[in-house]
Image (spheres, grey):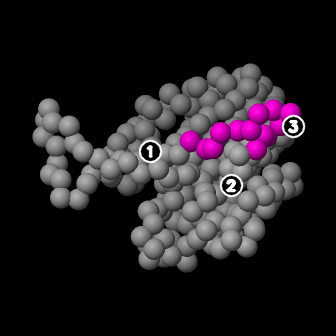
Amino acid sequence: VAVAATRRLGIAAPLVHLVLLHHGLFGSADHLDALQAHFLEHLQARREGRAAIAGTAPLPPPAPLLRRRRRPGVASAKPGQQQEFDEEHEELSVVVLNATGSQGRATLDGVDVCGERLADLAVAATRALREKGGPALKALPARCAVFPSRALLLLEGREESGEGEGAAAGAAGAAVASAQPPPLLPLLPPGSRVARISLVGYSMGGLVARYAAGLLYARGYFARPPPPPGGEEGTGGE
């Protein structure tokens, strides 16, 4: 329904900022639940223009994604010529995945193995969003939290009814605390594209995140345009 509505209204496929969290040696996803919830509170505070922490200065508005599109009627640029583009700013939905695939003694498998699991999680999440939408994230080895863009909330009518602001972050935050899939996942329809990706880890998790980033680069995850569907490389990196 959501993807049909976006096409009818002329709205592009929803763009996502994918954030992956990884714990340290002998750690677990429990150690990053608070950080995951804080991300949601931080995003909500920025949208409302208030401080995320009492006594601090209000946060600036969220940095929009700068999308460039060729102007209609302008021929493709030739070598050595600069192509003219239209600039379009679009707020991203944020998906935070707290990895659970290398918890406890599984971290003894090493940075390389844990890093490969994290890279696989990034590729699987990107493919799931593109092919099946937000609900497919429930099957991944991670605790998921979603902060939908204002455009998606307006599309669902939640912002006008007052459900889009504090309720959105509250629902996702409560889902993180109870380790249950948030009710906001259906807001991300099939065709959602990962436009940004961040990997966050502490202690050994930082090494795992760096290894995963290098592995994704080697696989062609960040390639533009990606190779044809079906290949392991280029399955993400929109």
In contact (CB < 8 Å): disc 1 and disc 2: no
Counting residues from the start of the chain, the first of labels 1 and 2 encountered is: 1
Q: Residue at x 60, y 53 (%)?
A: 93
User: Within 10 angstroms of label 1, few (less than 14), some, or many (20 or more) residues?
Assistant: few
* Residue 34 in view here: yes
In this rendering, which labeled residue sits more in front, label 1 or label 2? 1
Residue 190 image offset from top left, x and y in percent: 52, 65
Which residue has dot 3 on it? 54
Rendered position, 139 above or below 117: below
Residue 44 image offset from top left, x and y in percent: 73, 50
Q: Give the Cα separation between the discs numbered 1 and 2.
A: 21 Å
Rendered position, 193 above or below 201: below
Which residue has dot 1 on it? 66
Which residue has dot 2 on it? 146
* SS under mark 3: loop
Q: Residue at x 37, y 39 (%)?
A: 223
Residue type indicated by callout 1:
Leu
Residue type indicated by callout 3:
Ala
Residue type indicated by callout 2:
Val
